[in-house]
Amino acid sequence: MGKLSTHVLDTAHGRPAAGVAIELYAVQDGERTLLKREATNRDGRCDAPLLEGAALQAGQYELVFAAGDYFAAQGVDLPQPRFLDRVTIAFGVADASQNYHVPLVVTPWSYSTYRGS
């Protein structure tokens, strides 16, 4: 049985990003359905998988990370409006029996992701 997980790395400060608010949406026919709200722990991860087992279905999803709020809480001097505020990663799950790890590597000015396991 597969699972979906994430973590956030703050490469501006060289550490895991604790306290980042995350929203997970299922996307079908252009409609978004909120599935879960979480926040990262001290290790920049969620305490449990976002979805696992039967809850993880093949389809389209979005993870939305409140990166701007995180960096503001770290005391970073951000312009208004923020260059990066809410980072959205849209991705697909083709085989729900596999593990999908979708990390966010982020600074106030850039981000990247990849599919991990």
Image: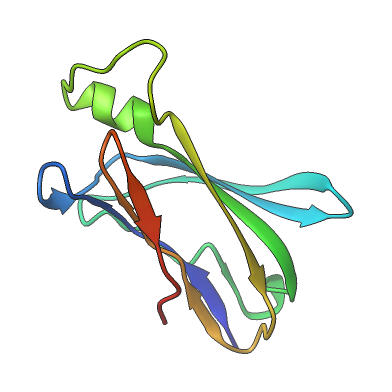
The answer to whether residue 94 shows anywhere in this view is yes
Q: Quadrant of the C terminus?
A: bottom left
The residue under the point 16% across, 20% down is 75
The residue sitting at the left extreme is: 14
Q: Position of residue 63 (x, y in %)?
A: 55, 51
Q: Position of residue 67 (x, y in %)?
A: 37, 35
Q: Is residue 78 above or below residue 13?
A: above
> On the picture, is 14 further left or further right than 24?
left
Counting every numbered tag in the picture gives 0
Q: Position of residue 8 (x, y in %)?
A: 31, 53
Q: Position of residue 88 (x, y in %)?
A: 54, 45
Q: Quadrant of the N terminus?
A: bottom right
The residue under the point 24% across, 46% down is 17
The residue sitting at the top extreme is: 80
The residue sitting at the right extreme is: 29
Which image quarter: residue 82?
A: top left
Q: Is residue 104 above or below residue 2?
A: above
The answer to whether residue 47 shows anywhere in this view is no
User: What colouring style does the render use?
Assistant: rainbow
Is 80 in front, or is 62? 80
The residue under the point 42% across, 62% down is 6
Q: Is residue 89 above or below residue 21?
A: below
> On the picture, is 101 further left or further right than 43?
right
The residue under the point 15% across, 42% down is 12
Which image quarter: residue 69?
A: top left
